[in-house]
Structures are given as C-alpha cells and as structure tokens.
C-alpha cells in the first residue's frame, strides 16, 4: 500500500506543477499593468518602477515564475493587496469555517442520499424508486443559491425559526454555531445527496444482481440481512470513494452558499477577493483548492484499495 | 458535473432505432418539451407583447403580481415577466455557446490524444488532469474574474472550465474506436489520418459527446446564473435570471416574487436538459437494456 501511495504522489507532481503554471498565468491574463492595480491612486513613475522591481515584473516571465513558485514552496503565497495579510494566513483563518460547513453538508448528504439510493434500488420500478429519482434529478437541477434564498424566505423571514445569516465558531457557542450553519449545510447537502443517491442506486443495483446475493437469499436469510450485511457492504466501496471525490463539488458549492448566508469562509473569501481585485488571494485560493482536490483524489484511491481486498493484495 | 462517459465497446445504436427509443421515453419527451418551450420563449422575445425589459416605472415599484404585471415588478418598477423572457436569451445563449466552446476545443484535443497517443497523449492528458483538479465553478469564477465581468467573458470562462470533460471523453472514446477492426482495415488500405478521423472516429464518438453536451448545457446554465448572481456575468440593466436573483435577495420581505420566478425558470430549463440528456443516453447507448 505504501508503494502505491508513493507512486501516486510521484504521478501527482507534474499535475501540481501544471496547475501552478496555470495559476501563475492567470495573473498574466490580467488586462493592463498589474502595477497600476497595486499602486491604487499612486501614479508617480518612480514609485511604479520601485513596485516593478519589488515584484520582479521587469524579469523575464520564466524567472518570475521560478521566483513565485520558490516562494510558494516555502509557504509564501504572497500578500493580500487589501488587508496586507499573508494569503496563507487568510486561507488558514477561513478554512475551518468552510470545513465545518462541508462536514455538516456531507453528513446531511449521506443521511439522505444513501438510504434513498438503497430504497430506490431495492424497490426498483416502484413509486419509491420513481420518487427517489425525481428527488435526485430535482436536486441536480435546482440552483443551490436559489434554494438558499427560498429557505431564508420561508424559515427565517416567514417562520422566524433560524437566523438568516451570520456565523459563530463551534468553539465559542456550539448551539448558535449549529443553528447558523444548519440551513446552509442543508442547501449544500441536498445537491450532494442527489449525486450520492444516484451512485448508491447504481452500485446497489449492480451488487443485487450478483451470485452471492442470490446464494444468500437461497440460504433463507432475511431480506434486510441480505441488503444491509451483504449488498450494502459491497456497494459501499464505490460510494465511499465517490464521497471523497465530491469534495470538489462541496468547495464550489460553498462559494455561493457562503455568499448567500454571509458565512466568512473560504468560498466567500474568493468572491470578496475577486471584487476587491485581490489577485494574490484568488491565485492562492485556486492553488490551495487544486492541491486539496488532488489530495482527496489520492485519498479516494487509497480508500478504494483499502476497502477492496482483491486490490489491497496487489500492493 | 454529470459525466456521461460511455466506454463504447459496441457500435452505437442506429439513428432511427435511437430516435424511436427516445420517442417512446415520456420523461425524455417532457425534457425536450421544457427545452423547446424556453427556446421558443427566448426566440420570440422581440415579438411577444411585453414591455421593454429595461423600462423603469417609478410609480410601480415592487408591485405584486397583477393583471397589469403578471409576475409583478422589481425594485425600480421594471416588468418581471418581460425581464424573465429576455433573460431566457442570456441563459440559453450562455449554455449553448459555452458548451460550443468546450466541444470545439476539447473534442479535437481529445481525438488527437487518443489517436496519436505517446507524447501527444501524455501532454494533453496532464494538462487535462491539472484543469480537472480545479473545481468547475471555482475555475470559472477565477477565469471570469481575470477576464472581467461580462456575459461574453462568462461564456468563455464556463466553456474553458467545461473543456477538460470533453477532452477526457473524446480521448477515451477515440482510444476505444482505434482498437476496432474497421479502423485497422482503414489503415491497412492506406487511408490518411484525416480520412480515418472523419469517416470512422468522429461518427462513432458522436453519440456520447452529444449526451455529454446536453448534460453540460444544464451545468453551464447554472454556472452562468451563478456568475451573474455574483456579478461576474450579464451586467445591468440587461436582464439575466442570475442577476435578477442577486437583486431579489435584498427584497425578500417586501417583494418575494422577484426571487421566485427566476429560480423556477432556471430549475425548469436545467431539469429539461437533464431529462433530455438522460433520455439521449438511454436511447444512444447500445448496452442500455
């Protein structure tokens, strides 16, 4: 297994290098002189030249890239133009908020998506299957920012049950933290639940056709035992790996969800950075997201091999 | 993004059989009807008897739905129904154009990677993997931010973000077709690369590309609405469903109808493309029972 992880890490290196080139090139796409954006109101040619020297903008582009990537490898993602804080500190500050949202959303997605997928597969062709499929397609088609707005209108404005926005860290006030996060987590979780339901249904249908399930039934085992102990156990292998891969969708969904519910997380940071023309932050966020996504992919592969005994033995 | 990757070990179903299967699928027909409805609304926008979508009326600010304004009015007295109808143009245009960009760049690159293999494949595949590592919407937001906020730039950003899916799909499909006997035969009789790709590869990889394109239009419409909602897509005063929702969220208590209609429209058109895409996949995939 360790050899497998090492091989996958080596394969990931060129991908990460390419992402870094892409992220670096984003800045070069910027129309106009980046120094003017940095300088704000300042138009003194001497100051502008000083900034060009400071940020090595007079160097050839490959040199600029090497200097930038050298800094990144030492944890230097640059500074926010707006707050002057190191980008890495900003990411470290906002990430726990988004992780809390993502974990809560994933719990909701698993609680809805997996039972719905199992029921749908076991009752294939019935009204339950039809209803679960309708739910899944609706979940995939509804824009989550609109679902968020509608929930705020119903649950916060009309019924007054939950706060419409705001955030309180879990460590400060756990109850209020859960109250403020439950609605955004539900919005984010329903879209994932739809994807998870479809994959669970498909995996369960595949497993339910297998010979060992027929044998288990022929032995006279109860239906529930066959489904939960034999079928679900095997169907879970692809479901667990897909859950890890849904991480990217979670991060993307968090961008809009955090915006609607005014949650000061990773997603809101990228949108604020875009509007403040804080390009170092945008670059930092894209790079961190991509590296995290590659990490989750690796985790998914490892989980797949670990859960699947036939692949585990291949080393 | 829904992935319609089909391994295509068998020849695709013939167009007439696929069409018959599609017509016999009521859910796919419902999807097609929804799509056609919105296409008709968008196309007929200039001739429909609705007010100018940008005309303001300060005497009719945030009016609830009534006979005069069937969907109500917005925060500066514009007719919401009219803005919905004209907004359909932006949404559908964004969906089709961005997927057109993704297909136009992604499919040739995917075919090149699958057909020539070796270093061409390695180079294209590594770049594709790198692009796939950035979540679709985050990549689109980053690109739209650097290109500048406009509907055109949003379409380019969405198209480039969706492109890797088509590269990967076209590559896989081409590699699968390349192992078929008829391609071997075509090579043996000395057909050139262009002829093999044009006569054998393209027709065989077309069905899964069509399915993926239909499903990606759904994703692209949501992405355009998301970018416009964030202020990175269609710019005011031109209407788009996403930007209408962006404004509507500030008037939820006073004018909830402003948020209701654009969301329902996005949901229905995206549902239509998803149903149609699923139906096409069932009709075109020879392995589907």
Image (cartoon, coloured by chain):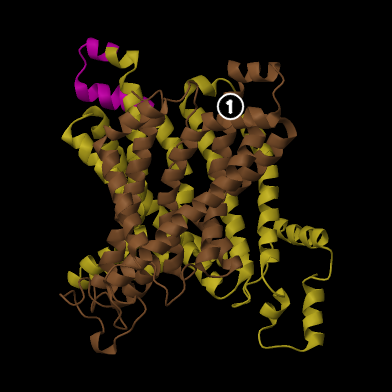
Chain colours: A yellow, B brown
Q: Position of residue A254 (x, y in %)?
A: 43, 59
Image quadrant holding the N terminus of chain A, namely top right
Report x, y in % for residue B262.
Answer: 31, 65
The residues colored magenta run: A215-235
Nearest the viewer among A315 and B41 is B41
- Left or right: A269, with A22 as reference point: left
Q: Is residue B234 visible?
A: yes
Query: Mark 1 falls on what kind of element?
Result: helix
In screen coordinates, is B229 left or right of B104? Answer: left
Residue A92 visible, this orientation: no
Q: Is residue A81 left or right of residue B42?
A: right
Give the vertical position of B241 relative to B24 (above or below).
Answer: below
Q: Residue at x 67, y 32 (%)?
A: B194
Name the image quarter holding residue A32.
bottom right
Q: Please determine whether, in this image, residue A303 is positioned above or below residue A83.
A: above
Subunit of label 1 = B
Quarter residue B214 falls in = top left
Residue B117 sits above or below residue B50 on the image:
above
Q: Quadrant of residue A28?
A: bottom right
Residue under label 1, please give it: B200
């Amino acid at each position: 297994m360790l050899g497998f992880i090492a091989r996958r890490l080596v394969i990931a290196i060129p991908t990460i290098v390419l992402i870094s080139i892409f992220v670096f090139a984003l800045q070069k796409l910027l129309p106009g002189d980046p120094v003017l954006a940095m300088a704000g109101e300042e138009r003194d040619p001497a100051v502008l030249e000083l900034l060009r020297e400071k940020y090595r903008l007079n160097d050839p582009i490959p040199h600029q890239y090497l200097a930038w990537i050298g800094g990144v490898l030492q944890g230097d993602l640059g500074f926010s133009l707006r707050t002057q804080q190191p980008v890495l500190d900003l990411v470290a500050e906002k990430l726990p908020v988004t992780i809390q949202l993502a974990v809560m959303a994933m719990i909701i997605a698993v609680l809805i998506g997996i039972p719905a997928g199992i029921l749908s597969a076991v009752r294939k062709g019935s009204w339950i299957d039809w209803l679960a499929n309708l739910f899944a397609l609706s979940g995939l088609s509804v824009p989550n920012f609109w679902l968020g707005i509608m929930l705020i209108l119903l649950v916060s404005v009309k019924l007054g049950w939950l706060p419409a926005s705001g955030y309180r860290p879990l460590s400060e006030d756990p109850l209020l933290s859960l109250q403020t996060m439950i609605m955004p987590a539900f919005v984010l979780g329903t879209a994932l639940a739809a994807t998870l339901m479809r994959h669970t249904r498909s995996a369960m249908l595949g497993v339910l056709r297998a010979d060992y399930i027929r044998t288990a039934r022929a032995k006279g085992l109860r239906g529930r035992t066959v489904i939960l102990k034999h079928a679900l156990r095997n169907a879970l292998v692809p479901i667990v790996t897909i859950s890890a891969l849904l991480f990217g969708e979670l991060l993307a969904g968090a961008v809009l969800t955090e915006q609607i519910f005014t949650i000061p997380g990773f997603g809101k940071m990228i949108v604020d950075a875009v509007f403040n023309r804080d390009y170092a932050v945008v670059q930092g966020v894209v790079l961190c997201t991509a590296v995290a996504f590659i990490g989750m992919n690796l985790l998914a592969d490892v989980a797949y091999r670990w859960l699947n005994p036939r692949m585990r033995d291949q080393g | 993004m829904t992935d319609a990757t089909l391994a295509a070990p068998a020849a695709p179903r013939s167009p007439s059989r696929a069409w018959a299967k599609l017509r016999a699928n009521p859910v796919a027909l419902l999807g097609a009807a929804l799509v056609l409805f919105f296409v008709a609304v968008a196309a007929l926008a200039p001739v429909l008897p609705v007010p100018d979508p940008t005309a303001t009326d300060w005497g009719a600010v945030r009016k609830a739905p009534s006979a005069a304004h069937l969907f109500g009015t917005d925060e500066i007295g514009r007719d919401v129904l009219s803005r919905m109808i004209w907004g359909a143009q932006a949404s559908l245009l964004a969906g089709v154009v961005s997927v057109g960009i993704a297909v136009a760049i992604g499919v040739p690159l995917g075919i090149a990677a699958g057909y020539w293999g070796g270093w061409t494949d390695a180079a294209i595949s590594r770049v594709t993997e790198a692009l796939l590592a950035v979540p679709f919407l985050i990549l689109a937001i980053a690109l739209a931010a650097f290109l500048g906020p406009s509907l055109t730039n949003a379409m380019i950003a969405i198209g480039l973000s969706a492109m890797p899916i088509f590269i990967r799909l076209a590559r896989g499909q081409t590699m699968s077709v390349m192992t078929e006997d008829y391609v071997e035969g075509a090579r043996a009789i000395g057909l050139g690369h262009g002829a093999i790709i044009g006569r054998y590869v393209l027709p065989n990889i077309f069905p899964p590309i069509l399915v993926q394109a239909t499903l990606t239009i759904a994703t692209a419409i949501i992405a355009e609405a998301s970018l416009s909602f964030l202020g990175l897509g269609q710019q005011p005063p031109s209407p788009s469903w996403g930007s209408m929702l962006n404004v509507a969220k500030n008037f939820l208590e006073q004018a909830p109808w402003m948020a209701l209609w654009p969301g329902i429209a996005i949901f229905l058109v995206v549902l239509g493309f998803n149903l149609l895409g699923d139906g096409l996949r069932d009709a075109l995939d020879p392995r589907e029972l």
